[in-house]
Amino acid sequence: MLTRTFGSAVYGVEARTITIEVNWTGQGMRYFIVGLPDSAVKESMQRVESAIKANDFKMPRTKILVNLAPADIRKSGTAFDLPIAVGLIYASEQLRNNDAIEDYMIMGELSLDGTIGSIKGALPIAIQARKEGFKGLIVPIRNAKEAGIVNSLSVYGVSNLREVIHFFESGESSLQPVTVNTREEFFQAQYDFETDFNEVKGQENIKRALEIAAAGGHNAILIGPPGAGKTMLAKRLPSILPPLSLQEALETTKIHSVAGKLPEDSTLIAKRPFRSPHHTISDVALVGGGGIPQPGEISLAHNGVLFLDELPEFKRTVLEVMRQPMEERRVTISRAKIAVDFPASFMLIASMNPCPCGFYNHPERECSCPPGAVQKYLNKISGPLLDRIDLHVEVTPVPFSELSSLRSGEASAQIRERVISARDIQSERLREHPGIYCNAQMTSKILKEVCAINLAGQNLLKCAMQKLNLSARAYDRILKVSRTIADLSASVDIKPEHLAEAITYRSLDRESWGG
């Protein structure tokens, strides 16, 4: 008897429906799985046999053939265990009420006793099930809330094989669909941060720079001696970023779901992600890839912040592979039989010491590095990468008088209000340019339209570039940052004082740096 069940395979951040056909004949006693399965799928028959026997069903002693269609795309992972087991039980005619199984998409990993383990990519699978018009989705109970985010789809969480069979045999009355109040949970968790800028003593100029970076979506690098507070300040940046929209939260959650990074019983990701990989990270781990392409750190930081601490310590090849994704805000992973796109729209925040010893330009301590060491240290970061970083911020140690002060700084909530107001101005200005929602994303053509400066501003910029030995690549960056500074002050025009502040954030473009 031929039986069909339905599952799903995830490619990139999208899912594709897979038909699982199970048939058996009276010849031989072997199992065959066809349809380009990987090793994990081929091994599923051993888990399925043990689970079926543990739940008082019989394993047919015949030739069993399982086909995963369409047969020309690769199937991977252990999530096909459950639909194969259900199909096999009905195909062997141990149960006859099989009319309902084709109305549901079924996914789950089986243990040897029939317990159902969690899977990756439950959210994109649920979206695909709704798109294909399935009556419902059956997933492991640990993934039920994640899949339950999708409206107009009945999602059932199950913990063992017996529950699934009883569900189909009892007329669907044994389980209740999961209900998730997505909006309520989402909006309650949006402003729940563990850190706040009011805990930071001093460093007002650095707070100002990070406020500008957040308001315009600009990349920034913090340069300063050890212990000056670079990492501490960077970790507080998400607390002043605009809250995620529901669409952005859905995109972010899909990526984390595919990567298996969502905690159990989680729903939508409510806060912007903050990813901080170690400097020993490989190229593939950063941008994504592998035999079966998986999202890397830059995709896990989508709609959030990627923080690279001690930037010169990262391998040069690792940093270079980021250049194209930073421009295109997505990364394409190509393999012989498949190419997948992962979104990668992130803010890059980096930190570094100014030299190997860490005390170049320190107000109180002498740098002990030999001549040329500072420039050699900086040269570990390529010019094209620095070209994509808008703000170069010099961080100095906090004096004892400020460190011991009992006065609290400005709270993140107050800074965030100004950032949101500036982003609203940018959204209105850029509404005719789809996919561009902040100043950092403006192209050269848009830059000419919205960043016109008067004669006084042109003279100031010309003088600064000549006297401070700024490079030509700094020109566009200065205009973008000055536009953001003007938006923060609700100014229609870019004024000379906005340009002057933007110019101060180009430290590494000075030819005198490290000389």
Image (tube, grey):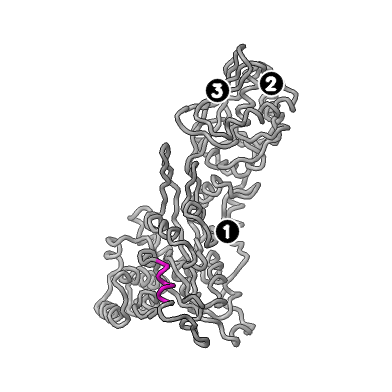
Q: Secondary structure at mark 2?
A: loop
State the separation of the CA atoms marked 1 and 3.
44 Å
The amino acid type found where label 3 is placed reads: Glu
Stretch in magenta: 374-381
Q: Which residue is mark 3?
A: 21
Locate residue 427, reporting x and y percent: 39, 60
Magenta segment includes 31: no
Q: Which residue is mark 2?
A: 59
Which callout, 1 or 3, points to the residue nearer the camera? 3
Compare marks 1 and 3 and give the one earlier in the sequence: 3
Left or right of 196? Residue 387 is: left
The amino acid type found where label 1 is placed reads: Gln
Residue at 54 percent of width and 81 percent of height: 397
Q: Secondary structure at mark 3?
A: strand
Compare marks 1 and 2 and give the one earlier in the sequence: 2
Q: Is residue 335 above or below residue 56?
A: below
Query: Residue 190 got which mark?
Result: 1
Which callout, 2 or 3, points to the residue nearer the camera? 2
The amino acid type found where label 2 is placed reads: Met
Picture quarter containing residue 46? top right
Compare marks 2 and 3 and give the one earlier in the sequence: 3
State the separation of the CA atoms marked 1 and 2.
50 Å
How many marks overall?
3
Q: Is residue 310 above or below residue 297?
A: below
- Marks 1,2: beta carbons within 8 A: no
State the separation of the CA atoms marked 2 and 3.
17 Å
Residue furthest left in the image: 455
Q: Nearer the viewer, residue 82 or 172?
A: 82
Locate residue 55, reporting x and y percent: 74, 27
